[in-house]
Amino acid sequence: MRRKIQLALLSLSILALAGCGDRIDVEDATLALLYGMELEDDHLNIYEMNPVFNKNAEKKYEMYKVSTDTTRHARPIFNSKMNGQLVTGKVQVLMFSNDMLEKEGIMPYLDSLYRDAKNAANMRLITVKGSVSSILNSEFKDKPILPTYLTNLIDVGKRTNQAAFVTDQEFHTQAFEKGITPAITEIQKKEENIQISGSSLLDNRGKYRASLSRRESAFMVMLQRKANMPLSITLTMPTEFKRPSLLKNISGKDFITMTVFNTKRKVKTRFSQGQFAFDVHLKMEVAIEERTFEANIDNELRNFTRVLNEQIKKELDALLEKIRQNKLDPIGFGIYARAFCYPEWKKVKDNWPETFAEAKVNIYPDITIRDHGVTE
């Protein structure tokens, strides 16, 4: 009997511990879906956007703005204006103005997001070319509410390799990993829509250093082994392929579009003569989807493949040169340096991006054409 009483008391204690003392009813909550930050006269402007669940409301969303010094201090100010208590566990998009990243970097403003377990762990981080307010004040009659529109836009960009894709948790890993530097999605406002412009490359403090176009971003995610297949690439063919053709376009240039449906990357790392060196062997299986010139691919396969390898290598070399000039390493060569040359890595780990700027990187594309269409 005594044992039964003890078990009953223990069960009651467990039930009490499992209670939801801090729960918020849905009707009493404001579900934030989007956060935006930018600097104005050295003050931090934070924007919040949430849906409105009221059939009588003219707008289907609300936007609030506060000027403050820290992200955490903004919450009670938001609550003083809202119809319900702010809940951030459903935030889908966290955006920063490009100017803010150039001046400050974003690491100081992310601290409270990582400390509070109730915050969403899968927020998509993006930068805006221009002001955040210009994006948030946009009204597109043929689009869903802005948080949904931006979420879909970023996800499509990820699936089609238009830009780097990173969540707040992934950004935390990249920022504190000394062998890599962060890269996030970059967007800009057009007249009738919002467009992914490419990727923003940041240093480990989250400060803006350079931008990559959508094309450069596609090559970057391929080198990162994060590309979603198939990946479509259009190349300009050199003069040796210029010949009279009914397929030639008005400008007289020759183009070929290939779809990459499989890649294998192998990185060889070494340290010699006081310098890190990386040999990147990139095997690519492709299908020819389009060409604007006459060619018998079967008869000229070897020469054709050679030219494609040269064109791809030229673009990859230009990308790597741009990255190293800005003293960045979004691809993560530092992780290979630590794994295979640890004694030398240990000496330079605290300034790896600067060391990588002096490293040698050799790219060796190896294209295999598996298919060139059903009709010649």
Image (cartoon, rainbow, N blue to C red):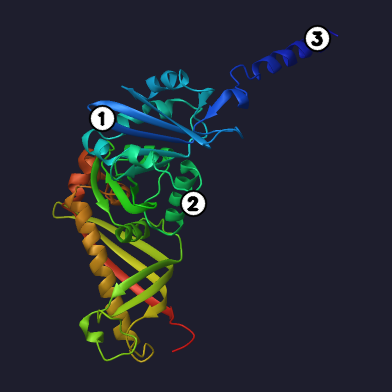
Query: Which residue sits at x=69%, y=17%?
Result: 14
Q: Nearer the viewer, residue 3 or 241?
A: 241
Give the amino acid at mark 3.
Ile
- Tag 2 residue: 142
Q: Cβ–Cβ below 8 Å for labels 2 and 3? A: no
Name the outermost residue toward the right. 1
Give the amino acid at mark 1.
Glu
- Residues under labels 3 and 1: Cα distance? 64 Å
Q: Nearer the viewer, residue 175 or 151?
A: 151
Quick check: can you spot residue 111?
yes
| Nearest to viewer (mark 2 / mark 3) | 2
Query: Which residue sits at x=70%, y=13%?
Result: 13
Q: Nearer the viewer, residue 244 or 106?
A: 244
Q: Earlier in the sequence, mark 3 or mark 1?
A: 3
* Crowd tier of the residue under label 1, counting other residues whose Cα lies within 10 Å: few below 14, some 14–19, many 20 or above: few
Quadrant containing the N terminus is: top right
Q: Is 239 left or right of 339, judged from the image as shown?
A: left
| Nearest to viewer (mark 1 / mark 2) | 2
Residue 9 position, x and y percent, is 75, 10
Q: Earlier in the sequence, mark 2 or mark 3?
A: 3
Whether residue 101 is situated above or below residue 320 in the rendered picture: above
Q: Is 9 left or right of 189, judged from the image as shown?
A: right
| Mark number displayed over residue 5 | 3
- Residues under labels 2 and 3: Cα distance? 65 Å
Residue at disc 2, secondary structure: loop
Query: Which residue sits at x=34%, y=37%?
Result: 133
Q: Quadrant of residue 214?
A: bottom left
Residue 281 position, x and y percent, is 32, 66
